[in-house]
Image (cartoon, coloured by chain):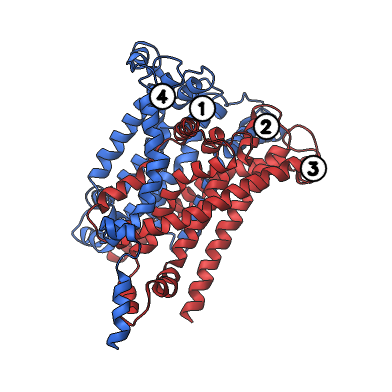
Chain colours: A red, B blue
C-alpha cells in the first residue's frame, strides 16, 4: 500500500516535471517566434515577403552589407554604445559601492532614487531631455544621445554591479590596507579583480541596452540616426527585406555577446578553481 | 612596520579636498557621481517639464504667467480615455504575465536544475533587441501571407483574416515585451522560499495547494510584488505595441503625450499629461518600495 502511494507520487511528480518543461519550452518558442519570422523574411530573393518562400536567397544580406548608408548607421550606433558603456561602468562602479558595500545614513533613500529612472517611461524621459537640451542650448547629435542613454542605463548598471558587490567581503580590502597597500593598489589588486564579473556583466548590459534603445534615441539624436531609428522609419514607410536582415543581425549580435560573455565568465571561474 | 602602516592609514581618508571639506563618509562619497549625474540628467529635466505644464497653451518659453489651464483642459476633455486604456491594458498584461511566469519561476528554481542558467539567458537575449524590431517580427508572423497564415494556407488551404491591429494583439505584444520584467523578480522571490520550510509543511500533512497558499506565496511575495510593480509601471508607459501591432486603434497615454509635443506643437499640454503620468507611476513605485528592504531582496541578509 505504502509502495503504491510512493510510486503514484513519483508518477505524478514526473508528470508535473514534464508539464513544466512543456510549458517553459512553449514560452521560449513564443519569445523567439518574432526572431524566427525576421530570419525567414530576410532569406528571400523577392522584393516582398510572401510565406511560404518560393525563392530563397541571401541577396538582401549582401545588398544591406554593401550599403554605405548602413555602414554609417552601424558606426553611429556603435560609437554611442561604446561611449555609454565606458562612462556608465565608471559612474555605476562607485554607485554600486555606495548601494551595497558601505553602510551610510542616506543609503536606503539612495537605493530608491537610483531605481526611479528604471521605472520611468522612456519615451517621456526622452521628451523631457529634449526640452532640457533645448533650454540649455545644447545641440542635438549622437553626443546628446549618449547623455540620454546614460540617464536610464547608469541606474541599470548600478543595480547589476551591486548584485556582485553584495557578495563582496569588505574584510579583503581591510586586510590589504593593513598589509600596507595604498588606496590605488587596493583598488587595482583587490576590489577590481574580485568585482570583475559584475563589472563585465554591467558593461555587457550597458552596451546592449544602448545598442537596442529606441525611445531615448528618437528625440535626442538630431540629424544623426541610430540603427533602431532607421529600422522604425523603414517599417512605417518603405519596407524592404533589408529591415528583417538588420533585425536578424541585431538579435544575433545580442545572442553572441551574451552567450559568449557568459561563456567567458564560466571559463574564468573554472580556471581560478584549478 | 609602524612606519609602513602609518601612511597607509593616512591615505584612507578622503584624498580630495572637496570631499574632506564636505566631510563625506565613504558611502556618501561613492554615491556622489551617480547623484550628481541624476540631478543633471533626471531631476532637472523633470523639473523643467513640471514647470512647463503650468505655462499657457502652445508657449515655448517659461517666461509666461503660470496657469492651470492645461490641467483644466485635460480633465474636461476626453484624454482621460487614453489614461484608462493604458491602465486597463497594463492591468490585463500584468495578470496574464503572473499566470504565465509563476510556473516558469517555480521550474527555474526547483525543477530545471542546471538548465536554469541557459533558460534564463534565453529569456534575457530578446531584452537587448530594440522593441520595435521584435514587434515587427510579430507583424511578419501574423500578416496576411505571413508565417502563420501562409503556413495554414499552404498546408490546409485555410484562408483566414489577419489578427493584426486589434486590442488583443496589443496585449500579446505587451505580454511578449514585458515578460522578463515579471519573470526575473518573480524567480528571485520564489528562490527565497527555503526548501526546509516547504518540506516541513508537507511532513505536517499540508496539501500542495496549502503549501502554495501558506508557504510559497507569502515567502516569495517581495519578488512577486516587485515583478508586478515593474511590469505594470513599464506597461503603463507602453507606446510601440499600440502603434505597431494595434495600428493606432488605441491611443495610449504616452502616445498622447508624444502627439502633444510633436504633431500638435503644444508643449505645455504634453508636459501636463506627462506630470499626471509621473504622479501615477511615482506614487505606485514609492508606495510599494517603501514596504521593502532592497538589501534582503538583492542578496544581503
Instruction: Using the numbered discs, state the Cα–Cα distance from disc 4 to disc 3 in whole angstroms.
Output: 43 Å
Q: Can you give x and y, in whole percent of width and height, for residue B46 in the image?
A: 38, 33
Q: Is disc 3 in the same subunit as disc 1?
A: no
Badge 4 local density, few (<14 within 10 Å), some, or many (20+)? many
Mark 4 or 1: in front is 4
Q: Mark 4 or mark 1: name the one nearer the start of the chain.
A: 1
Q: Which mark is residue A234?
A: 2
Q: Is residue A227 above or below residue A194?
A: above
Q: Which residue is mark 4?
A: B271
Instruction: Using the numbered discs, state the Cα–Cα distance from disc 3 to disc 1 in whole angstroms.
Output: 32 Å
Q: Which residue is mark 3?
A: A63
Q: Seen from this angle, which residue lies furthest left?
A: B204
Q: Which residue is mark 1?
A: B242
Q: Is disc 1 in the same subunit as disc 2?
A: no
Mark 1 or 2: in front is 2
Q: Tell me the quarter of the picture where residue A170 sits.
A: bottom left
Q: Mark 2 or mark 3: name the one nearer the start of the chain.
A: 3
Q: Which residue occupies the foreground of this view, B58 or B111?
A: B58
Q: Is disc 4 in the same subunit as disc 3?
A: no
Q: Is residue B244 left or right of residue B300?
A: right
Q: Can you give x and y, in whole percent of width and height, for residue A266 in the image?
A: 51, 69
Instruction: Using the numbered discs, state the Cα–Cα distance from disc 2 to disc 3 in whole angstroms.
Output: 16 Å
Badge 3 local density, few (<14 within 10 Å), some, or many (20+)? few
Name the chain letter of the residue that bears numbered label 2. A
Q: Residue at x 35, y 20 (%)?
A: B54
Q: Is residue A16 above or below residue B81?
A: below
Amino acid at each position: 500500500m505504502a509502495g503504491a502511494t510512493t510510486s503514484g507520487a513519483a508518477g505524478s511528480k514526473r508528470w508535473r516535471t514534464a508539464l513544466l518543461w512543456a510549458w517553459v519550452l512553449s514560452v521560449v518558442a513564443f519569445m523567439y517566434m518574432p526572431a524566427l519570422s525576421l530570419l525567414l523574411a530576410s532569406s528571400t530573393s523577392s522584393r516582398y515577403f510572401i510565406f511560404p518562400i518560393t525563392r530563397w536567397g541571401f541577396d538582401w544580406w549582401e545588398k544591406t552589407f554593401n550599403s554605405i548608408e548602413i555602414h554609417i548607421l552601424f558606426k553611429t550606433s556603435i560609437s554611442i554604445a561604446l561611449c555609454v558603456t565606458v562612462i556608465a561602468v565608471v559612474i555605476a562602479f562607485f554607485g554600486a559601492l555606495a548601494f551595497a558595500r558601505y553602510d551610510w545614513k542616506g543609503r536606503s533613500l539612495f537605493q530608491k532614487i537610483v531605481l526611479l529612472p528604471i521605472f520611468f517611461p522612456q519615451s517621456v524621459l526622452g521628451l523631457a531631455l529634449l526640452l532640457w537640451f533645448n533650454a540649455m542650448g545644447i545641440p542635438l547629435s549622437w553626443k546628446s544621445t549618449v547623455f540620454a542613454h546614460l540617464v536610464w542605463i547608469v541606474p541599470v548598471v548600478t543595480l547589476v554591479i551591486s548584485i556582485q558587490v553584495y557578495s563582496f567581503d569588505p574584510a579583503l580590502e581591510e586586510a590589504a590596507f593593513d598589509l600596507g597597500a595604498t588606496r590605488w593598489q587596493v583598488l587595482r589588486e583587490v576590489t577590481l579583480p574580485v568585482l570583475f564579473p559584475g563589472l563585465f556583466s554591467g558593461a555587457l548590459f550597458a552596451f546592449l541596452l544602448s545598442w537596442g534603445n529606441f525611445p531615448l534615441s528618437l528625440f535626442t539624436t538630431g540629424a544623426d540616426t541610430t540603427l533602431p531609428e532607421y529600422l522604425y522609419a523603414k517599417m512605417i514607410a518603405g519596407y524592404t527585406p533589408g529591415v528583417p536582415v538588420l533585425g536578424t543581425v541585431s538579435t544575433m549580435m545580442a545572442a553572441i555577446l551574451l552567450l559568449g560573455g557568459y561563456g567567458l565568465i564560466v571559463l574564468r571561474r573554472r580556471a581560478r578553481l584549478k | 612596520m609602524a612606519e609602513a602602516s602609518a601612511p597607509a592609514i593616512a591615505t584612507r581618508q578622503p584624498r580630495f579636498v572637496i570631499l574632506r571639506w564636505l566631510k563625506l563618509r565613504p558611502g556618501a562619497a561613492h554615491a556622489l557621481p551617480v547623484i550628481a549625474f541624476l540631478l543633471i540628467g533626471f531631476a532637472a529635466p523633470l523639473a523643467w517639464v513640471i514647470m512647463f505644464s503650468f505655462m499657457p497653451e502652445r508657449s515655448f518659453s517659461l517666461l509666461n504667467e503660470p496657469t492651470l489651464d492645461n490641467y483644466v483642459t485635460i480633465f474636461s476633455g476626453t484624454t482621460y480615455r487614453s489614461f484608462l486604456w493604458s491602465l486597463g491594458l497594463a492591468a490585463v498584461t500584468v495578470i496574464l504575465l503572473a499566470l504565465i511566469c509563476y510556473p516558469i519561476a517555480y521550474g527555474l528554481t526547483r525543477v530545471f536544475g542546471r538548465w536554469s542558467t541557459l533558460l534564463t539567458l534565453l529569456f534575457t537575449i530578446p531584452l537587448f533587441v530594440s522593441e520595435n524590431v521584435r514587434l515587427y517580427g510579430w507583424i511578419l508572423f501574423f500578416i496576411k501571407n505571413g508565417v502563420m497564415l501562409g503556413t495554414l494556407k499552404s498546408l490546409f488551404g485555410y484562408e483566414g483574416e489577419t489578427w493584426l491591429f486589434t486590442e488583443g494583439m496589443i496585449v500579446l505584444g505587451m505580454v511578449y515585451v514585458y515578460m522578463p520584467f515579471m519573470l526575473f523578480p518573480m524567480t528571485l522571490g520564489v528562490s527565497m522560499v527555503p526548501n526546509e520550510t516547504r518540506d516541513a509543511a508537507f511532513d505536517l500533512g499540508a496539501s500542495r495547494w496549502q503549501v502554495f497558499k501558506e508557504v510559497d506565496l507569502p515567502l516569495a511575495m517581495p519578488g512577486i510584488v516587485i515583478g508586478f510593480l515593474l511590469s505594470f509601471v513599464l506597461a503603463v508607459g507602453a507606446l510601440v505595441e499600440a502603434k505597431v501591432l494595434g495600428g493606432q486603434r488605441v491611443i495610449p497615454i504616452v502616445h498622447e503625450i508624444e502627439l502633444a509635443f510633436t504633431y500638435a506643437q503644444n508643449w505645455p499640454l504634453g508636459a501636463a499629461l506627462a506630470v499626471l503620468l509621473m504622479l501615477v507611476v511615482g506614487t505606485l513605485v514609492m508606495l510599494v518600495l517603501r514596504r521593502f528592504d532592497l538589501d534582503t531582496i538583492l542578496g544581503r541578509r
